[in-house]
Amino acid sequence: AAVTAQGLAAHLGNFLASYTMGFVLSCQVALGDEDGRILLWDGWAPQRVHWLGGHRWRVTDIRYFPDGERLLTCSEDHTAVIWNASSGRQIHVLRGHDAAVLGAEILPGGELVITFPSVGRAFVWDAASGALLHTMA
């Protein structure tokens, strides 16, 4: 049976008062906290899958790629990270933002990522290589 929101909250205890959340169809739940950690949680089991520690400051956005195999996180530390959702391994760290990265969009095919810092330009990235393709004013 799937875990309810109340059940998940009970299992997580006082993980944090406010968090960023993302879901994928396989029922994996990703929670980002104010310390920059991401918890991957199996919503069917229920059990923790991985702790991801790639950010230094608060996680501001979490998105799953359309294939469900990768995860994108954004942070106030001026980075976005692409992760392998199964292994918890970092695939690419997207650097070059001049401010906190508040959000992102993954284009439908999963090949391009657009990140949105709190000030300045939007950044367009190649998701496969992690290369910055261009910026938009």
Image (cartoon, rainbow, N blue to C red):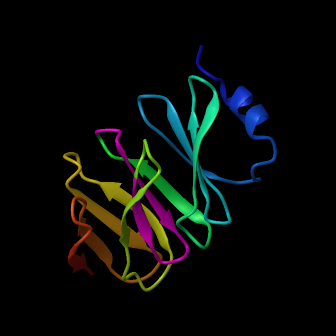
Q: Position of residue 11 (x, y in %)?
A: 75, 34
Q: Position of residue 17 (x, y in %)?
A: 77, 53
Quadrant of image for the N terminus: top right
Q: Position of residue 82 (x, y in %)?
A: 38, 59
Query: In the orientation shown, which residue stands out farthest toward the top?
Result: 1
Instruction: Name the residue located 33 percent from the left edge and 80 percent from the top edge.
Output: 121
Which region of the structure is painted magenta? 67-83
Task: Give the number of callouts.
Answer: 0
Q: Is residue 86 above or below residue 8?
A: below
Asked if residue 80 lies in the magenta stretch, the reply is: yes
Left or right of residue 65, residue 58 in this image: right
Instruction: Name the residue located 80 percent from the left edge and 41 percent from the top edge.
Output: 13
Left or right of residue 134, residue 5 in this image: right
Instruction: Name the residue located 75 percent from the left edge and 49 percent from the top edge.
Output: 15
Q: Is residue 135 above or below residue 70?
A: below
Q: Position of residue 6 (x, y in %)?
A: 73, 28
Query: In the orientation shown, which residue stands out farthest toward the right?
Result: 14
Quadrant of image for the C terminus: bottom left
**Near-viewer residue (89 or 25):** 89
Q: Is residue 30 above or below residue 10?
A: below
**Near-viewer residue (1 or 54):** 54
Left or right of residue 130, residue 1 in this image: right
Instruction: Name the residue located 59 percent from the left edge and 19 percent from the top edge.
Output: 2
Asked if residue 93 lies in the magenta stretch, the reply is: no
Left or right of residue 133, residue 46 in this image: right
